[in-house]
Image (cartoon, grey):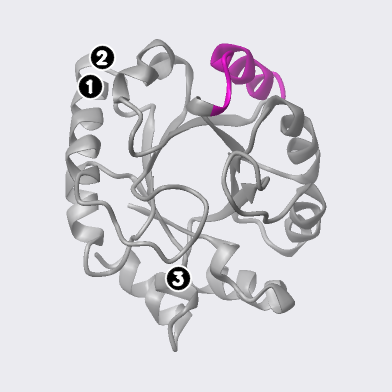
Amino acid sequence: MKIAPSILSADFSDLKSAIAMCQSAGADYLHIDVMDGHFVPNLTIGPVVLKSIRPQTDLFLDVHLMVTNPEELVKPFVKAGANNITFHIEATDSPLKIIEQIKSFNKQVGISIKPGTPLKALDPYLEKIDLILIMSVEPGFGGQQYIPESTARIQKLDKSLKILGIRKSVLIEVDGGIKSSNAKLVKDAGADILVAGSAIFNTEDPHSAIEKFKNI
């Protein structure tokens, strides 16, 4: 299982130190939450911040676009150094167009889905993407509680990917309310990547928190 600390919960006045800590603790990805204040009720970072992060680390930069019109931000985030770009299925009427756009830059592509959106909305795209991000909270803010029904959704998606014979090529990422107390449950349900923000950065020892996740 891979761990992707979400810098949304990090100290933005000292991101360089937070990133170095993530790398030294064995994090696999850095998760970059991009919010526009429209698709979700919060406003976070843009490509300029990612561009400043890129020289600080060789970690995989996992960009999660929680924005309206995600196609407008694909190229700016690619140029800023993203390794993967994930967009929301609910944010566009043309998912295939955005998938092809991201792939044209030779970047990995993911689709994210809100808790209330049926998994079947993903069906036409499962064989065209690298990652599915299951939101286990309503997107917009960190520090929320994990929605218990998310576990069954992860299991269902895991089963669907296995039936299609693409389970090894499509990763399942889970974001929202992830803590050391529920990480094993989520992992056992089928998650390949766990995104954790407050459970890492809002602790006395973030380095140890990452190591604890890695050992689950």
Query: Which residue bears the numbered disc 2?
Result: 164
| Quadrant in which residue 150 is drawn | top left
- In the image, residue 91 sits, relative to residue 139, either above or below, namely above
Q: Point out residue 33 in the picture as x, y percentages from the top left corner.
A: 59, 51
Residue type of the residue flagged with mark 1: Ser
Of helix, strand and loop, which mostly describes the magenta segment? Answer: helix
Residue drawn 66% across the image and 48% down it: 37
Which mark's residue is nearer the viewer, 3 or 1? 3
Query: Which residue bears the numbered disc 3?
Result: 198
Which mark's residue is nearer the viewer, 2 or 3? 3
Counting residues from the start of the chain, the first of labels 3 and 1 encountered is 1
| Quadrant in which residue 170 is drawn | top left
Query: Which residue bears the numbered disc 1?
Result: 160
Residue type of the residue flagged with mark 3: Ser
Label 2, label 1: how far apart the Cα atoms are: 6 Å
Q: Secondary structure at mark 2?
A: helix
Contact flag, marks 3 and 1 (Cβ < 8 Å): no
Can you tell which mark lies on residue 86?
none
Q: Secondary structure at mark 1?
A: helix
- Pick the quarter of the image with the C terminus: bottom left
Q: Which residues are magenta?
A: 91-105
Would you say residue 99 sits in the magenta stretch?
yes
Binning the other alpha carbons within 10 Å of mark 1 as few (below 14), some (14 to 19) or many (20 upward) gives some
- In the image, residue 112 sits, relative to residue 1, either above or below, namely above
